[in-house]
Each structure stands twice: as structure tokens, then as C-alpha cells.
Amino acid sequence: MVVPIKNPIEKWFFGHFALVIPALYGLRLAVQYAIEPDAVPYTWQHDAVRTASEVALLLAFLMGRQFLAPISPTLASLAANKVLRLRERTEDPSPCSKALLDGRLERRLNHRARIIFGTTAAVITALYYWQKGSFTRSVSSGGQLAFLDYALYLVPIAYVYFLGILAWKMLVSSAFF
């Protein structure tokens, strides 16, 4: 059986993202409201694109989970029906064993290169935030709440890291078949 997500941190995130993303978004709204109770939260007033991006990330993770779930049964079916064959340099196109296919795909899905994909996506997002001035938001007026708001504002960079991991897994599984 193929385990598409072996890393415990990735496994936890992909298992709980549907709770984590909305909860942290709600916490960010609550903190912004606590900082300025008489004003519309900054997130709703100035961050419509970021709000839409977080909804899009939620949908991407939901679809990615649906994409990864049937990999093992699909691979088993293809191997059982002898649809897949090993691509070796020899002339013998012998049918693949399910264990061999499982091992190859699992190694590729969980290869360390996925970290490069995730890190690249996170760095590009951080650079975008920097360019747009998101790192320079004022934290002096609200004390600890403003610092918490600032930290919560940067959390989507971590989401994008996991999106890069998901992109790697989708690319690998698409190339595998």
C-alpha cells in the first residue's frame, strides 16, 4: 500500500488543515477587533485578496487530499490487471509487481525534493508580502495583541509551503503514470 504522506508534520497538517486555516483566520479577526473594537478588522477592510487566497488554499488542499486518497487502490487495480509494466532498459516488458510499484511511487512521493518545492513556494510568497509591504505593518500601537496579529498575518506563508509539497506530490504521481 502506498503511503502518499509519510512525514508526521505533513500528515498532521493535511489531516487538520480544514480546522487550522479557518481557526487561525478567525483568531486573526478576533485579535484585530480587540486591537480596534470600533473599526472594521484590517483583514476585511484591506485584505480581500488575502482572504480569497486563504479560501483558495482551503479548496486546493481539499482537492489535493481527494487526489491523493485513491492512489493506492488505483495502483493496485492497474497492477492486478497487468496494465502497468516496468520501464527498464531490457527488452523484457514483464508485468510489474504491486509491491515494486508501491515502493517506487512511495519513494518518489516522499522524496526530499518535495521540501525544495515547498520552500521555494514559501520564499516566493514571503518576497511577495515583503514587496507589498505586509512585513512593515505597524505593531507599536497594540502591544502584544499587535505582535500576535502580525504573527498571524504571516501564517499563510506556512500554508504555501504545504501547497508546494502538495504540488510535488501531484507532479510526481502524474509523471509516474
Image (tube, rainbow, N blue to C red):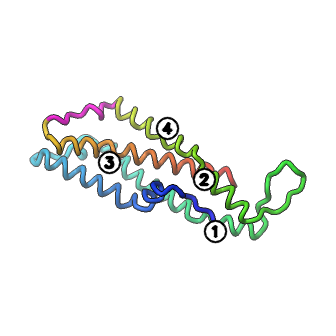
Do the residues under discs 3 and 2 have CB atoms within 8 angstroms? no
Q: For the residues carrying marks 3 and 2, which lies nearer the camera in this image?
A: 2
- Give the CA separation, mark 3 to mark 4: 22 Å
Q: State the image quarter where residue 139 is shown.
A: top left
Q: Residue at x 55, y 60 (%)?
A: 67
Separation of residues labelled 1 and 4 (CA atoms): 31 Å
Where is residue 163? Give x, y as percent. 47, 48
> Which mark is first along the chain, 2 or 1?
1
Q: Which residues are magenta?
A: 132-140
Q: Identify residue for label 4.
A: 120
Please say if 24 is above or below 81. above
Identify which amino acid the numbered label 4 is placed on: Thr
Q: Residue at label 3?
A: 51
Task: Point out the image quarter for the C terminus.
Answer: bottom right
Residue type, numbered disc 1: Pro
- Residue marked by disc 2: 109
Q: CA distance from mark 4 to mark 2?
A: 17 Å
CA gap, disc 3 and disc 2: 30 Å
